[in-house]
Amino acid sequence: MEGRSLGKTHQQWQKITATGSGMHQPDKISIYVRKNQPAMNALLSRITINPDICHGKPTIRNKRYPVELILDLLSAGSTHREILDDYPSLENDDILACLTYAAKLSKVKSIQKVLV
């Protein structure tokens, strides 16, 4: 959304930015969320990007749990309870934060083919 006008509704959006530094990491990643969705904003604040942790991949609360791990577990059929039992330092809101993060990232205008 940066560089584009948000029109009359620009006051309804909040920009959440994570910065990092590193040879293979972007300098900054921004996600826009609606200001009137405090629960979503609180969940997204659990997702951190730190070049010193997991090579700068998005992680949960600066712990060594990449968002992609949780999403892979969920897509393989693991339940929230199974994940929380296997990873006791995680909380239910951490799993919801991963889902919220993935949902936000999927809201793009176009997607290039992803090689598997």
Image (cartoon, rainbow, N blue to C red):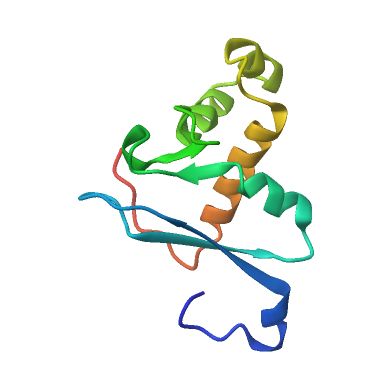
Q: Residue furthest top?
A: 85
The image position of residue 107, as x and y in percent, is: 56, 60
Residue at point 67% right, 20% down? Answer: 79
Image quadrant where residue 11 sits: bottom right
Image quadrant where residue 75 sits: top right
Residue at point 50% right, 44% down? Answer: 48
The image position of residue 54, as x and y in percent, is: 36, 33
**Picture quarter with the C terminus:** top left
Image height check: is 40 above or below 35?
above
- Number of residue marks: 0
Q: Is residue 43 left or right of residue 66?
A: right
Which residue occupies the foreground of this view, 72 or 39? 39
Q: Is residue 88 left or right of residue 70?
A: right
The image position of residue 76, as x and y in percent, is: 53, 22
Residue at point 58% right, 55% down? Answer: 104
Q: Is residue 24 left or right of residue 89?
A: left
Residue at point 77% right, 59% down? Answer: 37
